């Protein structure tokens, strides 16, 4: 089950509207302190900009919602970005849209569209993903089974399917091969049964826990 949506990585995107240049900066964050530091960093980097408009939504229930218009007319920039994030179900993210004024006023509606549109471009560049509970396993097996497991593994965990679906996140090469694997919690029992059958019971499960992960 999806817990919420967030962004996969930090990114930026540029949008030119009526000669004004809008640069959207996006970063995944897990606390207001992280978000505040990001906002300060961008403002310091673009001191010569006309505006640096910040917006943030943090918490799995969108507990923290904050924005500033940074000199733009009230309610035309920061607040619409927060509203857009909440409407799209995106959290644990901070956005700063930097504007270099191009000499043409956009009006209230134009500003709202410019800032939210630029923020969406930044989000797309950062990659919107789901955060959900997954089962993380670490197993130890003979090298004989490595290539078969790699062939069976998926590149990413997407929507649930009838078949067993898992990804291999990491491989350690010791006297045997140690695999860090991830699957949906409801598929964990099937995966461990598959491993036992494939390896005739020789695979050793070193750890198994439920964690939250971007998928």
Image (spheres, rainbow, N blue to C red):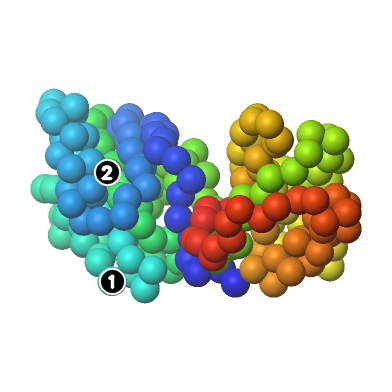
- Please count the marks in the image: 2
The residue where tag 2 is placed is: 96
Q: Secondary structure at mark 2?
A: strand
What residue lies at 21% left-to-right and 34% top-to-bottom? 42
Residue 63, numbered label? 1
Q: Nearer the viewer, residue 188 or 158?
A: 188
Q: Left or right of 132: which side holds 205?
A: right
Q: Left or right of 48: which side holds 109?
A: right
Instruction: Indicate the position of residue 6 as horizontal and vertical percent values.
Output: 45, 55
Of badges 1 and 2, the one in the foreground is 1
What residue lies at 35% left-to-right and 43% top-to-bottom? 27
What residue lies at 80% left-to-right and 51% top-to-bottom? 202
Instruction: Indicate the position of residue 59 as horizontal and vertical percent values.
Output: 33, 66
Image height of 83 relative to 71, above or below: below
Instruction: Indicate the position of residue 111 as horizontal and vertical percent values.
Output: 29, 50
Q: Nearer the viewer, residue 203 or 41?
A: 203
Q: Nearer the viewer, residue 135 or 139?
A: 139
Write down the quadrant of residue 189 in the picture.
Answer: bottom right
User: Which quadrant of the figure contains the N terminus?
Assistant: bottom right
Q: Earlier in the sequence, mark 1 or mark 2?
A: 1
Check disc 1: other Cα within 10 Å, few if <14, some if 14-19, many if 20+.
Answer: few
What residue lies at 15% left-to-right and 59% top-to-bottom? 74
Q: Nearer the viewer, residue 27 or 118?
A: 27
Residue 21, numbered label? none
Instruction: Indicate the position of residue 105 as horizontal and vertical percent values.
Output: 24, 42
Write down the quadrant of residue 177 in the picture.
Answer: top right
């Amino acid at each position: 089950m999806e817990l919420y949506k967030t962004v996969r990585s930090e990114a930026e995107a540029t949008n030119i509207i009526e000669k004004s240049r809008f640069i959207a900066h996006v970063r995944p964050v897990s606390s207001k302190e992280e978000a505040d530091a990001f906002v300060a960093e961008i403002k310091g980097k673009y001191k010569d900009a006309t505006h640096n408009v910040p917006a943030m939504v943090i918490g799995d229930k969108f507990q923290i919602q904050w924005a500033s218009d940074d000199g733009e007319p009230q309610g035309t920039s920061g607040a619409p970005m927060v509203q857009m994030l909440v409407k799209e179900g995106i959290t644990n993210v901070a956005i700063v849209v930097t504007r270099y004024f191009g000499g043409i006023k956009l009006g209230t509606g134009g500003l709202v569209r410019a800032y939210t549109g630029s923020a969406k471009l930044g989000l797309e560049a950062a990659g919107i993903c789901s955060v959900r509970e997954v089962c993380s396993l670490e197993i130890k097996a003979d090298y004989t089974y490595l290539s078969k497991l790699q062939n069976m593994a998926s590149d990413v965990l997407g929507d649930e399917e009838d078949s067993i679906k898992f990804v291999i996140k990491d491989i350690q090469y010791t006297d045997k091969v140690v695999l860090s694997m991830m699957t949906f919690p409801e598929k964990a029992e099937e995966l461990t049964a598959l491993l036992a059958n494939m390896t005739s019971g020789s695979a050793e499960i070193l750890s198994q826990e439920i964690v939250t992960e971007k998928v």
